[in-house]
Image (cartoon, rainbow, N blue to C red):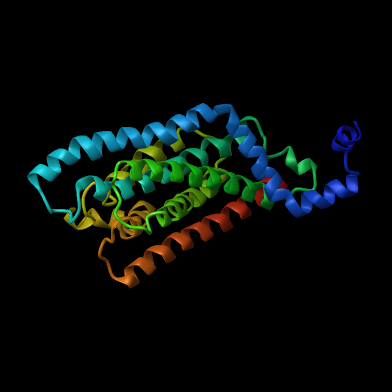
Amino acid sequence: MKLFNSTLKAHSPEVSATKAKKFGTLYVAEGHMLAMRRYIDVIIAYSVGNPLMYLFAMGVGLASLVDANSAGAFGVSYMTFIAPALLVSAAVMTAAGEFTYVIMDGFKWRRTFYGPLATAITPYQISQGLQLAVTGRILAQSIVYLLIVIAFGATASPWVWLSVLVATLAGTAFGFPLMAYAASLEEERGQFQLVNRFIVMPLFLFSGTFFPLTSLPWFLQWIGWISPIWHGTELSRVLSYGYDEPLWLSAVHVMYLVALTILGWHFSRRIFARRLEG
């Protein structure tokens, strides 16, 4: 009974405010993760069903045709070639979903971002808390995806586990700038659908996902150069099966993804602060 009562004992307002100032980002992240429990069945279905569907369709179905007619064209089996790209693409698509409608929901529809403002939690911490929660979801999803890829035998390197971190980084590199854009919108009049159709899908299709980027016409290759999917995919291929590329190019991939993540983190914090404090 004593333990039960002590568990229910509330902190004083001063202690609660101190804790909120210190751990506000973690509190906000916890709140978003608890909110994700409402659609955990959808998250699990997406995290498991999506990679299974793509790997069966592309890795088993299409790969059998490609390997039979173009043996050796990719240096490895076609499934091994596309598995890292599918891992990275899934992370980016999850980021596209979590950093659009959720942002509008927090500012406009249910205004969930304004509740924490009644405490000592700052707009910076509200922004960072959401980023932390979604990054955790992408990381967990990528681990599940990688386990399925390993079960399919589509990897040949002991360093493949690092591709989980690469996929997560690609997700934040695309998601954080998108979050800043979404936070700048006053109304959602179909902009997110346009983002999905005219940015996410072209990046998915023209980022060397299904064939090397160099096989595209020269006037389309620039899409891959600016795409987090391409930079993440190239890194993941190096880690998954020893894809041969210069070390300096791998360094460029990492720096590009980190730069986009930092820029997106910075601008989303500023926009959250301006909008919530204004």
Q: Position of residue 185 (x, y in %)?
A: 55, 42
In the depicted structure, whether residue 169 falls above or below residue 111: below
Residue 278 visible in the current orientation: no
Q: Position of residue 124 (x, y in %)?
A: 67, 52
* Total residue callouts: 0
In the depicted structure, whether residue 214 falls above or below residue 108: below
In the depicted structure, whether residue 42 falls above or below residue 87: above
Residue plotted at (43% across, 59% down): 257
Q: Position of residue 123 (x, y in %)?
A: 69, 49
Is residue 147 or residue 8 the one in the foreground? Answer: 147
Residue plotted at (48% across, 28% down): 42
Q: Position of residue 49 (x, y in %)?
A: 39, 31
On-image quarter of the N terminus: top right
Is residue 274 or residue 119 the one in the foreground? Answer: 119
In the depicted structure, whether residue 271 falls above or below residue 65: below
Residue 137 visible in the current orientation: yes
In this rendering, would 99 be left or right of 49? right
In this rendering, would 183 be left or right of 8? left
Task: Looking at this view, name the residue that lies furthest to the bottom.
Answer: 248
Residue plotted at (88% across, 39% down): 10
Residue plotted at (34% across, 34% down): 52
Is residue 180 or residue 38 the one in the foreground? Answer: 38
Q: Quadrant of residue 79?
A: top left
Q: Quadrant of residue 248?
A: bottom left
